[in-house]
Amino acid sequence: MKWGQEFAAKALLGHGADTTLSDKYGSTPLHYAAENCWVDVAEYLLLNNNDRAHINAQDDLKRTPLFRAVSMSKPSPDTQTIPMVRLLLQNGADQTIRDELKDTPLEIAASYYMVEMVKLLVKFANPVIINAKNSQDKTPLRLVLEKSKEFFDPEIVQIVKTLIENGADPTIPDKYLDTALHYAAQYSFAKNAEIILNWAKLSGKRIINAPNWQGKTALHLAIHSTKVLGNDLRVEMISVLLKYGANRWIGDDLGMTPVHYAAQISSIGITKLLLQDTDLSYINLQDLDLQTPLHLAVN
């Protein structure tokens, strides 16, 4: 405990200090205790206030003490962050309250791949908040997949698994009709895609060939994406999709199948992979320009 905050707080409270008053920034003592992870001080403040409403008080940026505790610890949580957040949740902190930017604590934790924080928050959350969309039409699951393109870490897989095991729905589309699987495929996150597809298999959801607004399936995106350098990750991603039943002969809005795109990018390995164990009677399918995969391969 730094500078004896606990003793000072106890002395002031013992002489009638009001725990609910806010300063010019809208911050209460609990806001400051929360963001600094002063667990003992926060516990004492909560014990000395029978009005539980103040636990969800919002500062000038609409942040609650819970939000401050989570957001001020990104991307590397302080050792006392988890106990601090647990204390707030156990005392009625509301995860559904959004800040000025319309974010929730869970969305912040997911965005910064804070594994233990996500596990704790979902333990106290309901499916509504787990699948809630922010102002950019993104769920926590979508946010963690998006963030991982910049800061890829094996712990991302743990967060995806945790969210799905606790009610996150990978089939929820954004405004472009892209689902979590589309996004995982686009960035060749094979392990994340496999978690999503295994969930779909167990729950009876048919998502493997779902089209987005351009008629593209996850397989289209895995092949055609410009987000991935090199073919190794791409091949791994495509193999996972094919394993779970991706259809290589579905045309998008341009009439192009995954085989068309493989031929277009002149990838021998991917083309061979797509042509294994399939009905080759479709090999001469034409797109809207009447081109077959062979046209694209030699053009």
Image: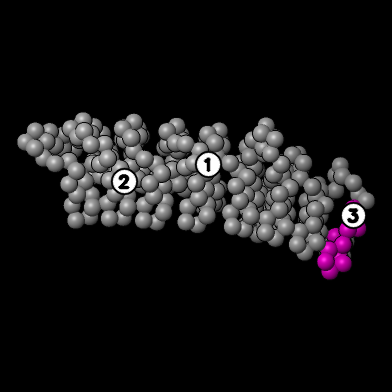
Q: Image quadrant for the C terminus?
A: bottom right
**Any part of residue 152 in sight:** no
Disc 3 marks which residue? 283
Quick one: 40 or 236, which is closer to the camera? 40
Asked if the residue at tag 1 contacts the one at tag 2, i.e. Cβ–Cβ closer than 8 Å, the answer is no
Disc 1 marks which residue? 156
Instruction: Choose the circle earlier in sequence order: 2 or 1.
Output: 2
Q: Position of residue 232 (x, y in %)?
A: 69, 48
Q: Which image quadrant is residue 266 in?
A: bottom right
The residue drawn where x is 83% and y is 52% is 249
Q: Position of residue 250 (x, y in %)?
A: 80, 53
Q: Is residue 51 magenta?
A: no
Q: Which residues are magenta?
A: 282-293
The residue drawn where x is 34% and y is 31% is 90
Judge left or right: residue 264 versus residue 90: right
Circle 1 sits in a helix, a strand or a loop, which is it? helix
